Amino acid sequence: MSDPHKDDRLIVPSSTILILFLTLAIVTPLASYRMAQNLVTPAVEELEVEQPAKGLIRKWTSNQYTYTLEQYPSDLERAGQQDLKLTFESGGTAISKGKSGNFKIRDVLFLDPDGDGCHTIIVWGQVDEKGALHKILGSSMKFSEDGVSSEGSTFDLTPIPNYLSEGYGGQDVIERQSELLVRRFPVLKDTDVEFPTGLERSMIWDFKKSMWRKDPRSER
């Protein structure tokens, strides 16, 4: 006969739970890193286009896709703003995504995280010409097999999770490393005076979760 005062529930030691969380924290970014290594982003060729008197137009092609980036000063009521438009074109179907902001474009990066041949475009720019703060925008599109219908999204890669933002004061470097989108910045002791610690924090963008994760290859 069982003892009514005896607790038969399974008790998991706190150390086991801690080890589980630590394992997940390490394995998740490593898995993302390994998966990215197995993808190969199709090469992109930049085309020559006639530049307008004001603004910027750039165009690229890859396989059956054409990508166009346009940036123009906004109207006087929104002085300092820039109208940014990205156009994806395939099989005669062209879809545009627009965004306004006050940043100056530094670079445009192309990745194909889902391996469908249509690139995700990352636009990286400075909020002001002097310095530190940056803006990172992403845009993706998925065309149907007949090229008639499509669906896409525009997302903001600027925010950094709290656990990775300590010591952040800008000075970002956004780059593609193999098939990874990597963001690096110097860790500062005081973000007001920009005194460096000598450390650099590196993060990898998780396209599935739409968030930055700690780069398992750092910190250095």
Image (cartoon, rainbow, N blue to C red):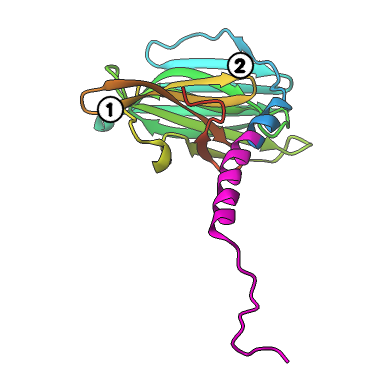
Q: Please report the bounds of the magenta region as a residue range.
A: 1-30
Camera-nearest residue between 164 and 143 = 164
Q: Quadrant of residue 83?
A: top left
Residue 216 appears in view: yes
- Residue at which label 2 appears: 60
- Relative height, residue 144 to residue 126 (above, below): below
- Relative height, residue 53 to residue 42 (above, below): above
Q: Is residue 53 left or right of residue 40?
A: left
- The secondary structure type at the circle numbered 1 is strand
Q: Is residue 137 left or right of residue 33?
A: left
Q: Quadrant of residue 26?
A: top right
- The residue most toward the right is 146
| Upstream in sequence: badge 2 or badge 1 | 2
Residue 21 is labelled as: none
Q: Is residue 131 left or right of residue 202?
A: left
Magenta segment includes 12: yes
- Residue at which label 1 appears: 189
- The residue most toward the bottom is 1
Where is residue 93? Give x, y as percent.
Answer: 67, 32
Where is residue 35? Give x, y as percent.
Answer: 70, 32
Q: How many numbered callouts?
A: 2
Camera-nearest residue between 31 and 60 = 31
Kind of residue sitting beneath label 2: Trp
Kind of residue sitting beneath label 1: Lys
